[in-house]
Image (spheres, grey):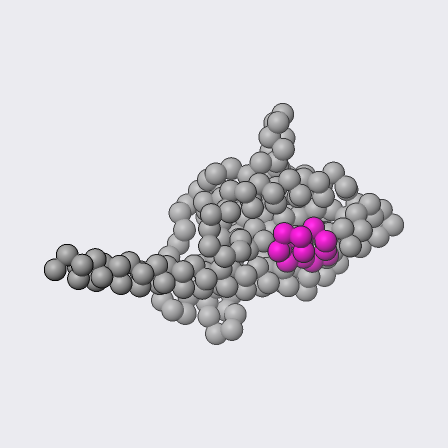
Amino acid sequence: MCSNGELQMFAEVNCRSHYNGKVMDTSQQKVDVNILLVGAENVGKTALTVRFITRRFIGEYGDIDWIYYHSDRIDGRDISFNIWDSIYARSPGASGRITEKQLQWADGFILVYSICDRSSFNVVRQQLQHIRHCKSKIPGSVPVIIVGNKRDLQHRRTVSSEEGRLLALSLGCGFFEISAAETYHGALLVFHELLDLIREARAIKKETHGIKGIVRTVSAVFGRRRTE
């Protein structure tokens, strides 16, 4: 089992302290995204993250609540991924509930379950409903990707691909079934797809704010005219 220090040395992952605020873009070419990974224990959240960042697979981890930092250049832009790999809440009645602090921090969410563990699929369903409820007042869709991990263990499968796909479709989420243990490509697709969804959500939010600003300006002008 790897300690935090061993993992950082082996995987060459840079980490920032928890609960930092959103980092604003310093130029048009730089994009910062905060991604929250949630799911039950032993579904491969950390393996997915480290596979994406380093292309390597490490099979065992300690019980780590950690934010990983990774920079890349995608489509001509510098992208900074801040990835919060969260611990599943095991306290009675918690139901793996995501905290308010995590909800405010995250630009997008990756919900991971194991195709070999139906209870982990149910956890993702609960967490997804909680995210949707808390984010319901935000314009546009909430960027969410559902990931069915451990596809290499087909002989132990208890959750079908169709179930995962239907859950994602019913709530407007992206969906991937992958094996973090076998390939890097699946992890890459997951994070890049979420990046695209975050960009779309930001564009919708910016457009909505722009329209509201125009409406306020027009209302103010007509309001003045009525009083003149």
Residue 174: in magenta span: yes
Outermost residue toward the top? 92
| Residue 45: percent from left, percent from top | 64, 47
Q: Nearer the viewer, residue 197 or 41?
A: 197
Q: Quadrant of the N terminus?
A: top right
> For residue 184, which quarter of the picture?
bottom right
Report the residue at 62% width, 56% height from top.
Answer: 172
From this viewpoint, is residue 127 visible?
yes
- On screen, residue 56 versus residue 101, left or right, reads right
Outermost residue toward the right? 155
| Residue 43: percent from left, percent from top | 70, 45
In this view, 18 is above or below 191: above
Report the residue at 46% width, 70% height from top.
Answer: 77
Q: Quadrant of the C terminus?
A: bottom left
Outermost residue toward the left? 228
Report the residue at 36% width, 67% height from top.
Answer: 27
Q: Nearer the viewer, residue 121 or 213?
A: 213
Outermost residue toward the bottom? 76
> For residue 91, which quarter of the picture?
top right
| Residue 127: percent from left, percent from top | 61, 41
- On screen, residue 127 versus residue 167, left or right, reads left
Q: Which residues are magenta?
A: 165-177
Report the residue at 45% width, 45% height from top.
Answer: 104
